[in-house]
Image (cartoon, helix red, strand yellow):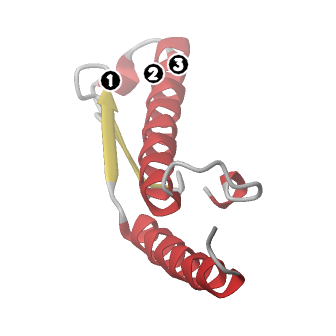
C-alpha cells in the first residue's frame, strides 16, 4: 500500500497535469460545419463559441431551416469540445472518475 506522501505527490502531479490541460483547452480550436459548409462554428476546448460564419446565400433559405442549422452546428461543436475535454482529462486522471472534475469542462 502506498504511503500518504506518495499519494499526495501523485495528487499534486495530477493537479498540475489537469491545470495544463485546462490551459490547453482554452487555446484549442474546434471547427464544425453543417449545411454543406454554409454554417461554420469555431469553439474552444471548453465549448465557448469563438466564431460563427454563415454563407450569405444560405441566409436566403427559410428562417426555420437557417435557425435549425445554426443551432445544430453550435450543438455539434460543443459536443465535440466536451468529448475532447473529457478525453484529455481522462488521460490526466488515468480514467478515474474524480468528483468535481466533471465541472471543470
In the rendered image, which residue does mark 2 sit on? 69
Q: Is residue 59 placed above or below 26 in the rendered structure?
A: above
Decide: is 8 above or below 30: below
Measuring 45% from the left and 31% from the top, which residue is drawn there? 76
Viewer-proximal residue among 97 and 58? 97
Of callouts 1 and 3, which one flags the residue occurring earlier in the amino acid sequence?
Answer: 1
- The numbered dot on residue 20 is none
Front label number (2 vs 1): 2
Q: Position of residue 23 (x, y in %)?
A: 46, 75
Whether label 3 touches label 2, CB < 8 Å: yes
Real-space Cα distance between discs 2 and 1? 10 Å
Q: Nearer the viewer, residue 100 or 95?
A: 95
| Labels 2 & 1 near each other (Cβ < 8 A) | yes
Mark 2 or 1 closer to N-term?
1
Of badges 1 and 3, the one in the foreground is 3
Spatial CA span between label 1 and label 3 = 12 Å
Q: Quadrant of residue 51?
A: bottom left
Cα distance in 3D space between marks 3 and 2? 4 Å
Q: Quadrant of residue 73?
A: top left
For label 1, the SS is helix
Element type at marker 3? helix
Image coordinates of residue 33 in percent, x first then y, are: 30, 32
Q: Which residue is mark 1?
A: 58
Residue occupied by mark 3: 68
Amino acid at each position: 500500500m502506498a504511503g500518504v506522501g506518495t499519494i499526495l505527490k501523485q495528487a499534486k502531479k495530477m493537479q498540475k497535469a489537469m491545470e495544463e490541460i485546462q490551459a490547453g483547452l482554452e487555446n484549442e480550436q474546434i471547427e464544425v460545419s453543417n449545411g454543406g459548409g454554409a454554417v461554420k462554428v469555431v469553439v474552444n476546448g471548453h465549448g465557448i463559441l469563438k466564431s460563427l460564419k454563415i454563407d450569405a446565400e444560405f441566409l436566403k433559405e427559410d428562417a426555420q431551416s437557417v435557425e435549425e442549422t445554426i443551432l445544430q452546428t453550435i450543438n455539434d461543436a460543443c459536443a465535440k469540445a466536451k468529448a475532447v475535454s473529457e478525453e484529455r482529462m481522462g488521460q490526466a486522471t488515468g480514467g478515474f472518475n474524480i468528483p468535481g472534475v466533471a465541472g471543470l469542462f
